[in-house]
Amino acid sequence: MSNRVSTALFVAALAIVSVDARAALIINGGFDANTIGSNFTVVTTSSTFQITGWQVRSSGTNTSASVDLVKAPYWQAHSGANSIDLFGTGTQQPSFLAQTFSVGASQLGAYRLSFFYSVNADTPRDQGLFANIVTGTGVVGTSVASSTTSFFYDTPADGNPTRQAMAWKQGFLDVSFATAGDYTLWFQGNSQFGNANQGAALDSVKLDAAVVPLPAAGWLMLAGMGMVFGLGRQRRFASA
């Protein structure tokens, strides 16, 4: 067996036993599927323009729910061109930005939600946001006191964002899907820290299958495969 083939088989085996290959569930996590002409576009629950894959939903008594889709270089996106301000222009309270997705029987298991967040660079100030994944297609509000899914951006400890350098911070949330069906991921600005028109910034949202740790038996199997490949090469060279 050639060195090239043996290496390829070894890598393939490692990928099979150590990584769960279920596909990502969230679409347009970087908010770049849409092109806008201005520095930012206000997106409401009923506006003609909507963000691909996402819905803006009202938050309790907030009847003017909206978010801003912000285009670089108005401020620096974490990736691509676009990002989100969770307090849309003209909004006095935060709104939900949500995406509903379906989990099939073959997709059950552990996942990790990751995203990057910062603060509106026009007036940098301490900001917070909530993130959660709930069963079904609805959204459920939460309070600062009871939330276990809150994320806080502390200026200047986490950075002093400017439009040119947003000092993005990464957040994580581990979840597990035990039953097939619909689930909803939502983000919401924290009204305790935000103010009208200037909320937490959001970008690069991913929900990927968690990496499955390789058990000891798996490492022994891979080590054995490596030894077999190595012995095969040695024998071939010795007989040459």
Image (cartoon, rainbow, N blue to C red):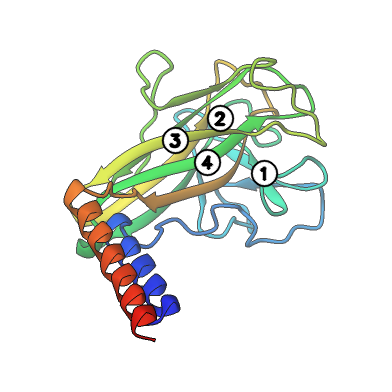
Residue ID for mark 1:
78
Say if mark 4 contacts mark 1, CB within 8 Å. no
Q: How much space separates mark 2 and mark 3, taking CA atoms?
A: 21 Å
Q: How much space separates mark 4 and mark 1, taking CA atoms?
A: 10 Å
The first of marks 1 and 2 along the sequence is 1
Q: Position of residue 32 (x, y in %)?
A: 65, 57
Asked if 78 appears above or below 48 in the picture, the reply is above
Residue ID for mark 3:
172
The first of marks 2 and 3 along the sequence is 2
Q: Position of residue 97 (x, y in %)?
A: 51, 43
Residue type at the position of mark 4: Phe
Residue type at the position of mark 3: Phe
Q: Looking at the picture, tell me which residue is in the foreground, 187 or 172.
A: 172
Nearest to the eye among marks 2 and 4: give it. 4
Q: Position of residue 100 (x, y in %)?
A: 39, 53
Of helix, strand and loop, which one carries label 2? loop
Residue ID for mark 2:
94
Instruction: Answer whether residue 21 is visible to the viewer in this image.
Output: no
Identify the residue at image location x=26%, y=44%.
176
Identify the residue at image location x=71%, y=29%.
120
Say if mark 2 contacts mark 3, CB within 8 Å. no
Residue type at the position of mark 2: Pro
The first of marks 4 and 1 along the sequence is 1
Residue type at the position of mark 1: His
Q: How much space separates mark 1 and mark 2, taking CA atoms?
A: 21 Å
Q: How much space separates mark 4 and mark 3, taking CA atoms?
A: 7 Å
